[in-house]
Image: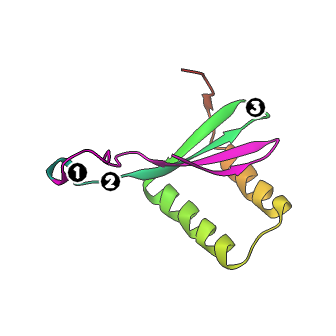
Amino acid sequence: MQMLYESDTFSVLQIHANAPEESAPASSVPQLVRHGFEIVDKRSNKEVYLDGSWAEMFQQRLSAWAQNTPTQEEVEDTLEGYSGLAHTPVSLH
């Protein structure tokens, strides 16, 4: 898990869902590794998890941002678009 973005209104985590532990033998590595992104809208206390094609599209956005650094407003506007998908209330475990 890696924190990619943190502000007063949003946080974005990259999650390596099936990443093998360092001590795991190579033969126990999962065949299908699914990575994803968790976007938390702090204003509504809801989160959305992006995986599959949604995660691929978000990764493309991140790659574009790496080439051409966005302003905080541009990042927040993009995350606002994804927050409309958020239906899961944030809960602490």
Name, please, the residue furthest toward the bottom.
67
Q: CA distance from mark 1 to mark 3?
A: 37 Å
Would you name the residue on which mark 1 appears?
29
Would you name the residue on which mark 3 appears?
44
Amino acid type at circle 1 is Val
Q: Between disc 1 and disc 3, whose residue precedes?
A: 1
Frontmost of labels 2 and 1 is 1
Query: What residue is rendered at 79% in x and 57% in y?
Result: 77
- Find numbered disc 3 in the image and state the secondary structure of the residue it sits on: loop
Q: CA distance from mark 2 to mark 1?
A: 9 Å
Along the line of sight, the residue nearer the viewer: 87 or 16? 16
**Residue 5 screen position, x and y as percent:** 69, 52
Amino acid type at circle 3 is Ser
Would you name the residue on which mark 2 appears?
33
**Residue 29 screen position, x and y as percent:** 22, 51
Along the line of sight, the residue nearer the viewer: 19 or 63? 19
Contact check, label 2 and label 1, Cβ < 8 Å: yes
Name, please, the residue furthest toward the left.
27
